[in-house]
Image (spheres, coloured by chain):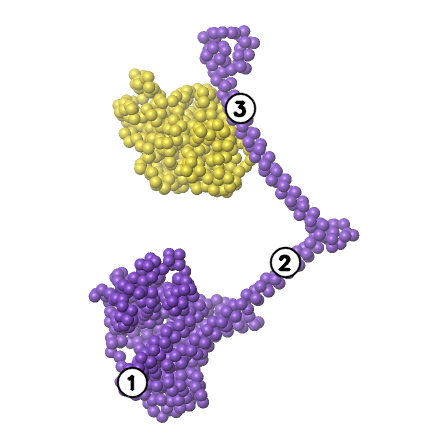
Chain colours: A purple, B yellow
Amino acid sequence: MTFDSLHPLLKRQVKKYLDLQGEIPEHLFNFLKSINQSYSLYDSNRELVDRAMKLSGEELFEKNAMLFEEAARQRALINNIKEAIRTISPEKEINDDDILRIGEILTNTVNERKEFEKQIEESRQKAEESLETRKLFLANISHEIRTPISAISGMSGILADTEISETQKQYVNAIQSSSKSLMVIVNDILDMSKLESGKFSAEFIPFDLRAILDPLYTTYLLRTDEKGIAFSVDYPNDMPKWLFGDPTRLGQILNNLISNAIKFTDQGKVTLKITFDKKGKHNEFCFSVTDTGIGIDQEKLKTIFEFFSQEDNTITRRFGGTGLGLAISKSISELLGGEIIVESEKNVGSTFKFCVTMPEASEQMKKDIIVHSDLTGKNILIVEDNELNRFLAVTILKKWNANIHIAENGEEAVQAVRDMPVDVVLMDIQMPVMDGVAASIAIRKELNSKVPIIALTANALESEKEKCWQAGMNEYITKPYNPDYLREKIIFLIENSTKTEEHSSEHVSMQSLSELMNGSKEQMIRMTKVFLDQIDKHFNELKLAFSENDLDQISKITHKLKSSFKLFGLNKTGILLERIEHRAKTLDRHELNSELQIILSMQPRLTYLVQKELNQLILSISNS
Amino acid sequence: MKTEQLQWTVNCDWDFTNSSLKNAQLVLVFAGIDIIPNCDHYEKLHAVYPDAQIVLISTSGEIHGNEMFDNSASATAIYFEKTPIRISTKENIAGRDAAQIGIELAQELLTEDLKHILVFSEGGHMNGDHLIAGISKNLPSHIAVTGGLAGDSARFAKTQVGLNKDISENMVIAIGLYGDAIEVGYGSNDGWDLFGPLRLVTKSEENVLFDLDDTNALELYEKYLGERANELPGAALLFPLCILKPDGTKLVRTILSINEENQSMVFAGNVPVGSKVQFMIANFDRVIDSAGTAASTSRINENENPDLTLMVSCVGRKLVMQNRTEEEIEAVADTYNDESTFCGFYSNGEICPTTDGVNSLHNQTMTITTFKERV
């Protein structure tokens, strides 16, 4: 450090007060060095401070400018309002009263907006109603079509078994295949409308998986042979036989996937492969249908599961189909707790795969299914005005060795029940002279008979179902029916006729609930909704516990449920639940299974009864 | 209480010729990070103080007497006449919940006659806010926690603390002082000036700051630093962040590191979303004066000076004051007329109760703990 290298200010000060130049004397060196450092440090710090102050000044200026702009906007707004008031009353100076007027203007604006919103809401409701009408129309139309088709299909089947010439056989085959394709289309449309209206539900019954797979193989082998392609169904030998699930829906998906695969494959092969993975009590089954067909464009893969979607319109022209099959299969697989996944390569082939969990059926259930396979000696009354349908029913029931009686209308049916022993009545609904509902009421009220009555109808409308329940009918099956399903229901009803009868007259009483809620309808609605959810949830749990033979869980669930049912006046069901709880606790398996089946079969009816009360409550509130 | 101080420098090894405090129970060693591995300080100190627990803390500058050194080791041997001490450590703390570490440390030290806790933690990754909250959680409110986070010569990478032979980048040490004989005073002050607009923290995760007023905080710092932005993160110490809490109290936060990748800044303590913050800038005189103010606050008794004065000052102050750094140490020593043993270090975070008595982590302060033993 020399005099010249000192900080300019220090240099001046040293020169002025110490009269120093050139070398710095030793005794001042450290002192001056320290001062020099301080001065330099101040300078560098000064730079930083200057910069910081300049920048923060700019930032504050920007923020001020923004505030100024905002203030200007506010002023303009106030001026606008004042201007508006002046327009309303030009002669008047603006004072405090004007603020009230502003309020008035604002209120009017808000009211106008509300009115507008109301109009929108009304038109939205109208749109929804028309959508509802469309769905009803679809359901109706498809049933109108289904009845004749099922007759054509059934009759031609019978015709094919008679002695006819080769040419005639060909014609019959043509009729059969045409009516089958027509039925597929109608069923697709009906399923779609059910899916859209949320009325599609899965069953939960014991079934033999191989009994679905083997017919699939036989059916499609014929078709693939004709096309000159290979077809195989592979499943592991150790696959469990008896399962708990929904065989009809499962078959529906597999049918759809296989027939699609065959449709789009001209050479090579179609394979249905089943694998299963044991996960504790549950088995995860994966079904994959692989083909070597035309494949699907990657871009289209996303949309093929949408309703009315085929890969493109040329497909419809070339291969036919409604474009509903995959969408329905997807929805059904979701209903069964699975999901369809597709992998495909154009001109190489496609694989559709879905996995569902199905528990193994318990020993007792298997026995139930195997033992009662025919109807020998049972008296079955068929009530049907349509000759073709009647003939079809007779032919089917004869196969199971039942004694068959015929009635052509309701009146004849009542007479028949009065005059002879009848184990089950199969009741058509729309008939001349006396319809099925009236006949059922007469059988229950006038004859005081508890004979099981199964409604067989082409109409799947809820309103009709409701009438059947009210008339005291025990079961409701839509035509065309699956013969095995019909047989199952007949057997079940005959076996449990006395027990089921007790509960078919069950009704809801809202009195206890009303007392509990001090008559508050809002509270009652809330409670009823909770109860509906409860039925849904706990019945599903009960099904699971039943399939797993979990007595502890069954007793817990029934214990939870029974008091709720009693609260809604459903005392018979309450008592039945109590009995099941007791049997589960005392390990009385003998009666438990059949009683559980009864209670599970009652779920739709119970839900319907409670829902009806809920609707009335809601209606009574909106009316008052 | 008796104390003696020894020093090791690159040019001058420990000299124990005048050492007389053979029965010291505690030796505090403050050392530059680079000189810790080279020499067997523990072996040498242990040979002279066989009964002592030797606690080592890496620093960004060692305070020895009223002077400041770099890359030295300063040892202060302490003999307590009537005060029992107990030491608790947690090792391998990386990835562990800092609050839980704190709770465990306090639990091991807490007895009815616990008087004070001194904490020295590694200062590279530790969330000091959480650590202190954890320590204080189950402590009676009259027990203060003071100390600091170790430094690493202002590199903000990895620090070290050690007890006896165990030296680690991954360790916290807590020293409990017990009984009625020991009296402890403490004080903390920063002296920085607030400037510029108040800003709102709009995006942060614990001690990682992303956005102020919905704009990137790192960009804002770079703008303010201008040419010195390439000296980040060290340069960010020139503009510490003052956090104004809703209750009116304020805490100063400095930057430990920056992350160019996600454009974030890591602070030495939490910067919660929704807090108002303001930039700070140094005025040398006020910064130096604040050290004197802290010393006055930490005075135990009006007419007597403490036996031992522990200074924990922020590395940020040192980086700003450069060769005037020692002036703040002198300001503290002046307050006690040079009549106390002065030791301490430049740290990555100072620990001391706030004015309303809540044990807290501070940045940019001179934090002083004074000790007096009644015999």
Protein chain holding label 1: A
Q: Position of residue B357 (x, y in %)?
A: 46, 36
Q: Secondary structure at mark 2?
A: helix
Q: Closer to the camera: disc 2 or disc 1?
A: 1
Callouts 3 and 1 in the same chain: yes
Furthest residue to the bottom?
A: A419
Q: Residue at x 51, y 31 (%)?
A: B224
- Residue under numbered circle 2: A110
Q: Which kind of residue does numbered mark 3 sit on?
A: Arg
Question: Which one is earlier in the sequence, the residue at label 2 or at label 3?
Answer: 3
Q: Residue at x 26, y 62 (%)?
A: A275
Viewer-proximal residue among A341 and A86: A341
Callouts 2 and 3 in the same chain: yes
Question: Which one is earlier in the sequence, the residue at label 3 or at label 1?
Answer: 3
Disc 3 residue crowd, few under 14, some 14–19, many 20+, Cα 10 Å = few
- Residue under numbered circle 1: A164
Q: Quadrant of residue B146?
A: top left
Protein chain holding label 3: A
Label 3 to label 1: alpha-carbon separation:
115 Å
Mark 2 in CB contact with mark 1 (< 8 angstroms)? no
Mark 3 in CB contact with mark 1 (< 8 angstroms)? no
Q: Position of residue A597 (x, y in %)?
A: 32, 74
* Disc number placed over residue A46 in the picture, else none: 3
Callouts 2 and 1 in the same chain: yes
- Residue B322 visible in the picture: yes
Q: Which kind of residue does numbered mark 1 sit on?
A: Ile
Q: Position of residue B57 (x, y in %)?
A: 35, 28
Q: Is residue B232 left or right of residue A287?
A: right
* Disc number placed over residue B185 in the picture, else none: none
Q: Residue at x 32, y 73 (%)?
A: A596
Viewer-proximal residue among A199 and A610: A199
Furthest residue to the right?
A: A91
